Amino acid sequence: MNAVGLAPAASQRVFRAVLDAMAHPGEILRIPAAGMAAGGDTPAALLPVLALADLSTPVCVLAADPRWAGLVTAATGAAIRPLEEAGLVAALDVPGPQQLRGLRTGSAAAPELGAQVFIAVSGLGESAGLRLSGPGIAGERALSVGGLPDGFWAARAGLVRDFPVGVDLVFLTPDGRLAAVPRSTTVIEEVR
């Protein structure tokens, strides 16, 4: 594992992919190949944090391997903080419902303080699983997210019920595909 920082051009590509995903909730997009290549062996879910974090950003890295948090600090200067204090979260290990409930949601006066969470998942698809609606979606959009624990979407619903407070979620696969579910998106879990 080498210390990795993103060059400005790669950082811009990753940032743009995240912006596009947030503007089009549930649409499966891709981090450009140049952004993925610049990350080397860095997990895709860590790339947005490397692109967005700076000295003033509290970051949490949920990973079994503690070295990833050290690499974020070395590359960005961001301070590593507990989950409930983090503005950016790289969840290399999928958070359970209890962890999700501990995320920072901001307040009515400062909703921008809600966490942005980048979650490594096993797969993304456009098949049944979830029905999304809200800003950025014409009608409804189907999305399936592989590797989430039971209770995940119920915990997320609790975090966004007092909009504009809440958290923004971006799911990333190892090959750089991503889909966002911002706090403004309504999610209905389809019965299996």
Image (cartoon, rainbow, N blue to C red):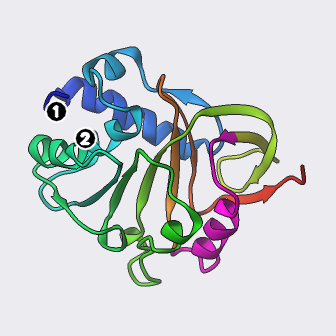
- Residue 76 placed where, x, y %? 14, 45
Left or right position of 45 against 168? left
Quick one: SS at disc 1?
A: loop
**Over which residues does the magenta segment extend?**
145-165
Q: Nearer the viewer, residue 7 or 69?
A: 69
Q: CA distance from mark 1 to mark 2?
A: 7 Å
Residue 2 on image: x %, y % = 15, 27
Residue reaching furthest to the right: 191
The image quarter containing residue 11 is: top left
Q: Are marks 1 and 2 in contact (CB under 8 Å)?
A: yes
Q: Earlier in the sequence, mark 1 or mark 2?
A: 1
Q: Indicate the quadrant containing the N terminus: top left, top right, bottom left or bottom right.
A: top left
In reply to whether residue 147 is colored magenta, the answer given is yes
Is 1 placed above or below 94 here? above
Secondary structure of the residue carrying tag 2 is helix
Q: Is residue 129 above or below residue 14?
A: below
Relative to 47, residue 135 above or below: below
**Tag 1: amino acid:** Gly
Q: What x and y, as percent, mark residue 56?
A: 15, 62
Which of the 4 image quarters holds residue 84? bottom left
Q: Residue 50, which numbered label? A: 2
| Quadrant of the rendered image containing residue 183 | bottom right
Mark drawn on residue 79? none
Q: Residue at x 42, y 57 (%)?
A: 116
| Res 5 label | 1
Relative to 147, residue 12 above or below: above
Q: Residue at x 80, y 58 (%)?
A: 188
